[in-house]
Amino acid sequence: MKFKHKAFPYPVLTSASAGRDDYVTSSYEYDFSVEPMDDSLVNSTKRSLKLIHKCTCEEISQLISEKHACYVTLVKCKKTISNKIFKTFSDEQIVPIDLSDFFGCVEISTQIIATSNIDIFGSDDLNDEFSGSSFSFSPGDRLAIGDEIKLSCDFNKINFESLITIDLSEELDDDEYVIKVKSYSIQVLMGKRIRALFAQLESEKTTEPYLFMSILKDIYLHVLQAVSSDEELKDSIVERTMIKQMNRYDIQISDEPSLEELNGYAQRFVSKRGVEALSARFEL
């Protein structure tokens, strides 16, 4: 979102270093940090993006306090086509994000936008071009634009299962499920009955191993087939996470792997939480 140098028919507040001088001394900047949402969840992809908005223009700050304007934080990732918008009237903002939604470069930008019709606006800090003038704003008009920050996501702490999403599909038969491997996620579409059964098995530790012996093994197999044959998945988050999994088991896939080879690897991935868990329970 590169609006800093765009021509607007009204003054726009920016950071002191942005090179725009609609205001003489006032500026809009922000501090931010990214922290785990829960330190106890070691492999969690959940994060809190903490921002402190700093608007030194008294007239715009007054609009925010009266809820005629608000802070807007945009989190965008082109590779995953993810575009999230968060609004607040508070100077301090906590934005919940999930790293599994992003891959590669993530762009963070902030704005102050009008939330209602503002008939008359003026500021004592406007430069000579706008000095003595008053302006009107409509909902959505940008009053201030913060600097854009680009981050590179670190996926080292993401595990394979955190990339899996289970969704209900009205188009599938009750007992069907379909696995779709994307560069940044693994989607499993399920019919009504098997989705309900999956939820039931997942909710209880005594029945969870059956998932690993069946559905999760199929997921591993599909992903192994995809990353070994689909060039579009090269260096994707799914491929990198699968490589990390293979390294853990000291597995090297051959150049042209057979279905039998890949199925054997998938069985190894789920064995500990599937067959071994049930064998221990039944003392086999």
Image (cartoon, grey):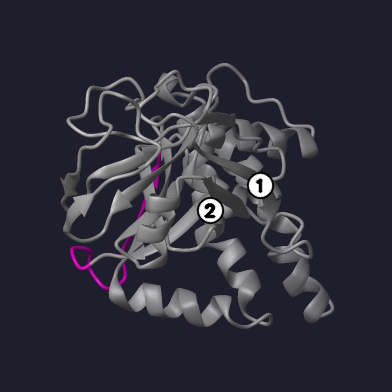
Measured as percent of width and height from the top left, residue 137 is found at 18, 49
Q: Eyeballing the image, is 14 above or below 265? A: above
Q: Residue at x 20, y 43 (%)?
A: 134
Please name the residue shown 79% across and 32% down the image: 250
**1 and 2 marks in contact (CB < 8 Å):** yes
For the residue pair 177 and 45, the one nearer the viewer reads as 45
For the magenta stretch, what is the residue range? Answer: 170-182
Q: Name the residue under label 1.
A: 34
Along the horizontal axis of the image, is 230 left or right of 277?
Answer: left
The label nearer to you, 1 versus 2, is 1
Residue position for label 2: 97
The C terminus lies in which quarter of the figure? Answer: bottom right
Across and down, in percent, residue 230 comes to 42, 24
Task: Count residues near mark 2 (Cα–Cα under 10 Å), then give few for <14, some for 14-19, many for 20+.
Answer: some
In this rendering, position of residue 166 left or right of residue 150: left
Q: Is residue 29 magenta?
A: no
Q: Measured from the top left, where is residue 242 in percent x and y?
A: 62, 37
Residue 54 horizontal/vertical position (percent)? 55, 47
Residue visible at 41% across and 23% down?
232
Which residue type does callout 2 highlight? Ile
